[in-house]
Image (cartoon, rainbow, N blue to C red):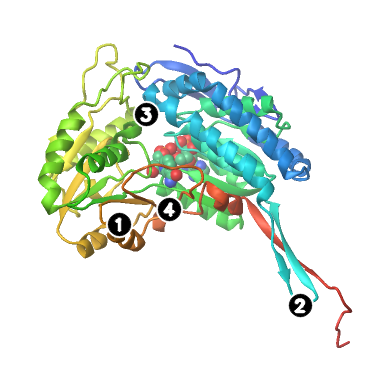
Amino acid sequence: MRAQPEASHYINGRFVEDEQGAALPVIYPATGETIATLHSATPNVIELAVEAARAAQGAWAGMKPVERGRILRRAADLLRARNDDLAKLETLDTGKAIQETLAADAPSAADCLEYFAGAIAAYNGDFIDLGGPFAYTRHEALGVCVGIGAWNYPIQIAGWKSAPALAMGNAMVFKPSENTPLSALALAEIYTEAGLPDGLFNVVQGYGDVGAALVEHDAVAKVSVTGSVPTGRRVLALAGSKMKHATMELGGKSPLIIFDDADLENAIGGAMLGNFYSTGQVCSNGTRVFVQKGLHDRFVERLIERTKKIRIGDPLDPETQMGPLVNKAQHQKVTDYIRIGREEGAKLACGGNVPSLQGFEEGCFVEPTVFAGVRDDMRIAREEIFGPVMSVLSFDHEDEVIERANATEFGLAAGVFTRDLPRAHRVISQLQAGTCWINAYNLTPVEMPFGGYKQSGIGRENALEALGHYSQVKSVYVETGNVDSPY
Ligand code: NDP
């Protein structure tokens, strides 16, 4: 199976290669096959990309917002029209089941492009009446923005960053995760086909050092990273040292709270979506599932029944519900945590093994795993695992569970299942998390801001909030009389 793109990088509207850069093999996580080989960006490639973005940005920012929006809208249509091919590419790159990549990856990027295509013309400044004189504000582009992506939702992340950046009149240089470099190149080609002027969306490949070189570049005004907390800290420090704007979408260990009166099947469905979708590699996952004592045993029993039915295997088979983890390192990390959970005394309720699947012996598969009887102080309840490992904890009272849910350095997401709506709103208002759900989990429509509290991040993606993070406000005071000067 090959998925070799024309070249490694996409700069100024065309593919660019520089074989001097270190080789980056692209591995299909289901079989271990090398499906493409790319090259990491050399300093020359980084310079070309930033310069192309810098040169193109001014004229783009000078276009009418509605014209910029029209191009994004055409790109959204192309993403939807090519969804089958893009889903296959994303499955080969990430290992995620095709039934997910068809529904959640390019479609989410398309939703985002479509949203900002329409929203940008209505994103205007304020008129401020000063009783004669007046002031107004302008939202102005920042210039060249850098996007750095994680490997779990490659094209979605590229879309979520580039759409608001471009709509606002910026140019972008995007560096995908070196694990999943392919679909950002496909997005770049689509932008060009949709009529985006050359230089406005560039893709350069590489490891963290390429990301760091981009962040450090003097011509770059802003960086938006999706990744882990340690990476976020490093990038934010570097951006801060040069007074650059920064958005950080980082990791989590989010609580999902299920009260006794919740609809049992819906609550289990939410918990499974919030732990097993994308083989558990979702930043907002509700990996600490707190279940109230009265429902706890029935919840665990039924959860096991439903979890055992998850179909794991060939990611390209439309019937498959769970593919492998992204690579061997992540597989090692997740299986280590399963071992740690056992050693810490959590009860392995189901899963926990590496399945043997014919034809996929080299794949990075692990069974969907549920630990019950988990205590707050266990590592599996405190650290982000980023795999299909759910921890179930029990609780008695509302105040108790709020305190325990908040006892974490993270604050990305949280969820509550209950039929008592006043309680749902009361509890959500006290949870320290940026993205919350009531009687649902992990739905992230573009209309809703997405991002974290505490160590989980700074800034927001999606919704009008994202435009604020890709622009700066200029205030203009206008005198309508004479200048009142004492001199
Ligand atoms: P990493 O933090 O390892 O990497 C994220 C990106 O940053 C990669 O492209 C990486 O390149 C790059 N990078 C690494 N070091 C630097 C540096 N010093 N300067 C600039 N760029 C750098 O995250 P993963 O890719 O492993 O993704 C998993 C993490 O992402 C999890 O913690 C997850 O929770 C989080 N995440 C957060 C989301 C959110 O929206 N809040 C959504 C999805 C994931 P390379 O990979 O080549 O090293």
Question: Label 3, label 2: how many angstroms apart (C-alpha)?
Answer: 61 Å
Query: Which residue is labeled 3 in the image?
Result: 326
Say which residue label 2 marks: 131
Q: What residue did someone put label 4 on?
A: 452
Q: Amino acid at mark 3?
A: Val
Sequence-first disc among 1 and 2: 2
Mark 4 → mark 3, Cα distance in angstroms: 24 Å
Assign a secondary structure to mark 3: loop
Can you see residue 210? no
Q: In which quadrant of the rendered image does the C terminus lie?
A: bottom right
The image quadrant of residue 391 is top left
| Badge 2: residue crowd in 10 Å (few <14, some 14–19, many ≥20) | few
Q: Amino acid at mark 4?
A: Gly
Q: Is the CB of mark 3 within 8 Å of ligand 1?
A: no
Q: Quadrant of residue 341?
A: top left
Among the two numbered marks 2 and 4 on one chain, the one whose residue lies closer to the N terminus: 2
Query: Sequence-wise, which precedes: disc 4 or disc 3?
Result: 3
Could you tell which of marks 1 and 4 lies nearer the N-terminus? Answer: 1
- Whether pointer 1 and pointer 3 mark residues with C-beta atoms closer than 8 Å, the reply is no
Measured from the top left, where is residue 57 in percent x and y? 73, 42
Badge 4 element: loop
Say which of marks 1 and 3 sits in front. 1
Question: What residue sits right under mark 1 in the picture?
Answer: 421
Q: How many residues crowd mark 1 within 10 Å: few (<14), some (14–19), many (20+)? A: few
Q: Residues within 10 Å of mark 4 (few under 14, many from 20)?
A: many
